[in-house]
Image: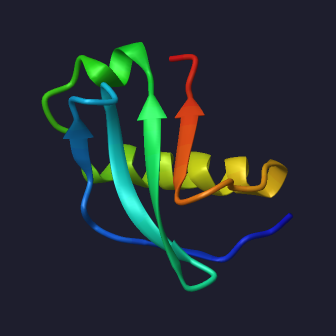
């Protein structure tokens, strides 16, 4: 399913979930996307290129999955 999502520029590391996250607006609803990855979890900051890659990962995830609630947890291999 192709979802239209607008990403906010609020990328932060969430210590509670041990994941990088940012918010977005999808179908008028604010959602939080969490990216779980061992290698990302070791980074102190994420550059614009990596943030763009995370947005692309989220878009690909949304093409294959339907969000449940206002949080999306994406498990990444790397």
Q: Is 34 left or right of 66, judged from the image as shown?
A: left
Q: Is 11 left or right of 69, judged from the image as shown?
A: left
Residue 38 placement (x, y as % from top left)? 39, 14
What residue is shown at x 39% (from left), y 62% (from top)?
23
Residue 41 placement (x, y as % from top left)? 29, 21
Whether residue 26 is visible to the viewer of this picture, yes or no, is yes
Q: Is residue 5 above or below residue 73?
A: below
What residue is shown at x 22% (from left), y 47% (from top)?
12
Q: Which residue is situated farthest in the front direction here?
A: 69
Q: Nearer the viewer, residue 26 or 52?
A: 26
What's the image's color scheme?
rainbow
Q: Nearer the viewer, residue 9 or 14?
A: 14
Q: Is residue 19 above or below residue 31?
A: above
Q: Quadrant of the N terminus?
A: bottom right
Q: Is residue 67 above or below residue 75?
A: below
Q: Which residue is situated farthest in the bottom direction here?
A: 28
Residue 68 placement (x, y as % from top left)? 68, 54
Q: Is residue 49 above or below residue 46?
A: below
Q: Is 15 left or right of 5, judged from the image as shown?
A: left
Which quadrant would residue 26 be assigned to in this image?
bottom right
| Total marks placed | 0
Whether residue 46 is visible to the viewer of this picture, yes or no, is no
Residue 71 placement (x, y as % from top left)? 51, 51
Which quadrant would residue 27 be assigned to in this image?
bottom right
Q: Is 17 left or right of 14, judged from the image as shown?
A: right
Q: Nearer the viewer, residue 49 or 2?
A: 2
What residue is shown at x 36% (from left), y 16% (from top)?
39
What residue is shown at x 35% (from left), y 70% (from top)?
8
């Amino acid at each position: 399913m192709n979802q239209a999502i607008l990403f906010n520029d609020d990328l932060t590391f969430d210590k509670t979930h041990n994941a990088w996250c940012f918010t977005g607006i999808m179908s008028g609803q604010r959602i939080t996307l969490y990216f779980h990855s061992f290698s990302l979890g070791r980074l102190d900051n994420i550059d614009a290129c990596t943030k763009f890659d995370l947005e692309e990962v989220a878009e690909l995830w949304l093409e294959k999955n339907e969000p449940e609630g206002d949080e999306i947890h994406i498990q990444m291999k790397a």
